[in-house]
Amino acid sequence: MDIAALKQHDKEFETAYDGGSDYELTIKLMDLFVLCPRKRQRKQQYERLVNYLASKGITLRIISRKHDKTTHT
């Protein structure tokens, strides 16, 4: 179900996943939570998905506001 949601979200992810290519998908935690709901909106809830995708050559990079190092002026 998570994979299907990510494929719909990002067609390049779909191509990489189906074709066995390396790929990096960067997504905001809040967006991932909408696509692939979990009990809590925390990065740790997606560790199994991140590890599974890594075994397929796909890096899932989750950005959370809490850990975003971008400074605003």
Image (cartoon, helix red, strand yellow):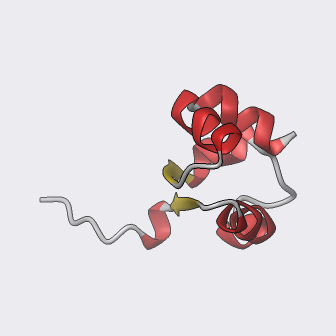
- In the image, what residue occupies the spot 83% across and 54% down? 38
**Which image quarter holds the C terminus?**
bottom left
x and y percentages locating residue 52 in the rendered image? 77, 64
Could you say which quadrant of the image residue 36 lies in? Answer: top right
x and y percentages locating residue 37 in the rendered image? 81, 46
In the picture as drawn, the residue positioned furthest to the left comes out as 73
The mark tally for this picture is 0
For this view, does 35 lie left or right of residue 15?
right
- In the image, what residue occupies the spot 48% across and 69% down? 66
x and y percentages locating residue 60 in the rendered image? 58, 59
Q: Nearer the viewer, residue 27 or 52?
A: 52
Q: Nearer the viewer, residue 67 or 73?
A: 67
- In the image, what residue occupies the spot 68% across and 33% down? 7
**Which image quarter holds the N terminus?**
top right
x and y percentages locating residue 69 in the rendered image? 31, 72
- In the image, what residue occupies the spot 72% across and 73% down? 44
60 lies above or below 10: below
Could you say which quadrant of the image residue 41 lies in? Answer: bottom right
6 lies above or below 72: above
